[in-house]
Amino acid sequence: MADDGLVSGRAATGPARRALLIASAAALPALLAACRGVQSLGTPPPPPTDVDTLRNAIDHETALVASYAAVIAAGGPAAPGGQAGAATAAGGGRLATALAVVLAEHRQHLAQLRSRLVEPAGHGSPTPTAAASGSVILTIAQLEQAEQAASDRLITQLAGLPPTLAQLFASIAASEATHVPYLQAARRGR
Amino acid sequence: MTSTPGAQQPVIAALQSALAAEQAASYGYGIVGAILPQGSAQQAAASTDWVAHMRARDQLTALITARGATPVPAAVAYKLPRPVRTAAEARALATTLEDGVAQAYLALVGLPEKSLRRFGAEQVRAAALRAQAWRGSVQAFPGLPGEPSAS
């Protein structure tokens, strides 16, 4: 890049050429810095897929935590087609307890997933977009569907992950699958 | 995937461990089923789970044989962790068996082979679901020894 500038300056004569050379020399550090900048952006490979996969899992787990927190804050899950908190009357304290237990487990999942993510400073903060989606009060059936989907998603993402991360994904997938019958039992008051 | 004996060694070891866990579960569920009330829904559940373990045991036997190794045969009898005389003790044994199975399958998930990872993960999930039904509660990290603490 810097060479191009000097070569094109060769055609100029006298003061104009000198001015151009000075200009080129003055521009050189900036050009080098720019080159270095490009180089430093280009040298590290694009983020490995396992980092993307982990970030994605963190986003989904964050959304689940937000969903449960919103349901609990609203006093219970939405009744199908009804208002927030309507379903608690049926499930009673049993359901409230189950929701709190499941939320606590998702917080544990999230903490473990986040602890595996090593990112440069400025990255890795909780994702507000995923959290915001949890402000909708879901029905208990929707929570169960979200658990099953989360479990299935994790199991399809194991290939290529580092072994211990794959094991964490599989363990969380198993835990989330068990939330489905656990919530169903609580819903029926069993 | 390489098929050198060196690369296959951890694979065979993990498959043999899972097989041993399934053999122990197959034995243990026989006791669980015998102790639970005759004709009860719980005894039927124990029977269903027992079949699932025998099926998994056969799958593991096939996986080991396909890799040119010999499946380690089951023991004639297994020492139970605790005496099992009541229905509650039988349910506790079933839970313990499932936890052991889940842990053994999680080792398969740590292997690089894609199909074994998937198989292991599906089995960890199946074991966790059975364990959940027996204990009536949930766990944050099924199969992970010494569950990592929160935050």
Image: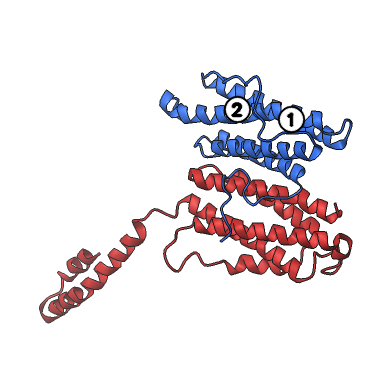
Chain colours: A red, B blue
**Is residue A161 among what the camera can see?**
no
- From the top left corner, tell me how far across and down residue B49 is, in percent: 75, 33
Q: How many marks?
A: 2
Q: Is residue A122 left or right of residue B146?
A: left
Viewport quadrant of the C terminus of chain B: bottom right
Name the residue type under label 2. Answer: Ala
Q: CA distance from mark 1 to mark 2?
A: 14 Å
Vertical comparison of B47 with B70: above or below: below
Residue corresponding to mark 1: B29
Badge 1 crowding class, 10 Å Cα cut-off, few under 14, some 14 to 19, many 20 or more, is many
Identity of the residue drawn at 76% across and 54% down: A144
Residue at 26% x, 72% y: name it. A30
Q: Evaluate whether residue B14 shows in this view.
A: yes
Query: Which residue type does callout 1 highlight?
Result: Tyr
Task: Kindly identify the residue that appears in the image at 57 percent across and 20 percent down.
Answer: B71
Q: Residue A55, position in %: x, y?
A: 54, 57
Taking the image as shown, residue B13 lies to the left or right of residue B133, namely: left
Q: Nearer the viewer, residue A141 or B6?
A: B6
Q: Residue under circle 2?
A: B20
